[in-house]
Amino acid sequence: MSQDLIDRLVSDLRPTRRGALQWLLVGAIAAGMIVAAAIMVPWIGLRADILTAPGTAMFWIKLGYTSVLGLLGLAAAMALSRPDRRKWPALWAVGGVFVLTLAGGLWQWGNAPEAVRPVLVLGGTALVCPFLIVAFSAPVLAIMLASMRRLAPANATLAGLAAGLASGGAGASVYALHCGESGMLFLALWYSVGIGLVALCGAVLGRTLLRW
């Protein structure tokens, strides 16, 4: 009897396409970034020098920092969405990326004229930057968590944290196309606060939404 029941339960099962999990989460990030960009452009617009900004190093440093954090979060989310993974040690790489950026910011600050140093730390948008990153990351996080509900993470809180990190990096990358700040210390401090807030929101929401 029990074997017959098992046979009936598995009779309609089909093998999952290889890479389905990865493509699901990559698609979630891409869709969220499109929504974030669609909100940002009419709301606050692209930076005024968007055509010439790619010729500056800081433009790519900013996008590089946010993209690396987002990709680390995405890789963690892919690993932690499986029922056999409760930890992902490479999350510690996030700390390394932050420390390197902070060190670069301190070097830039230390070599700048004293009159310029406050601008490298606070810029003109320190009070709004983290909250705008949270705002533009929100649609990414919503789509990420909705997608991950179809999966089976063993550690819902940590999986939510990874989703938040991926979403924060993606949202910050979109925001970077508006932000004209040029200080690496500004990047290490205020961008990190915004991305960290999104990661924290992901952990809190994931604890409930990703439980199974």
Image (tube, helix red, strand yellow):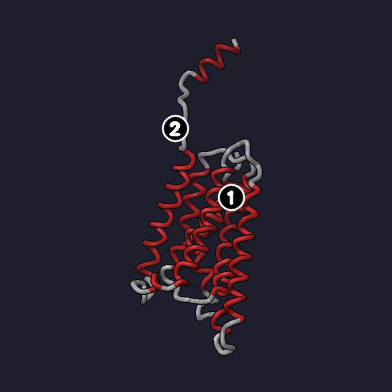
Say which residue appears at 56% left-offset and 56% top-offset: 165
Instruction: Give residue 77's position: percent from left, percent from top.
Output: 55, 47
Is 1 located above or below residue 204 in the figure? Answer: above
**Is the N terminus in the top left, top right, bottom left or bottom right quadrant?**
top right
Residue type at mark 2? Arg
Instruction: Give residue 63's position: percent from left, percent from top.
Output: 47, 64
Say which residue appears at 56% left-offset and 60% top-offset: 198
Say which residue appears at 63% left-offset and 40% top-offset: 85
Q: Quadrant of residue 92?
A: bottom right
Residue 17, numbered label: 2
Mark 1 and mark 2 residues within 8 Å of each other at the beta carbon: no
Q: For marks 1 and 2, give the one nearer the viewer.
A: 2
Residue closest to the eye, 185 or 200: 185
Tag 1's secondary structure?
A: helix
Residue closest to the eye, 212 or 26: 26
Residue found at the far bottom of this picture? 115
**Is the C terminus in the top left, top right, bottom left or bottom right quadrant?**
top right
Please tell me how crowded label 1 is: few (under 14), some (14-19), or many (20+) other residues with Cα within 10 Å.
many
Is 47 located above or below residue 162 in the figure? Answer: below
Q: Quadrant of residue 60?
A: bottom left
Tag 2's secondary structure?
A: loop
Q: What residue is shown with label 1?
A: 160
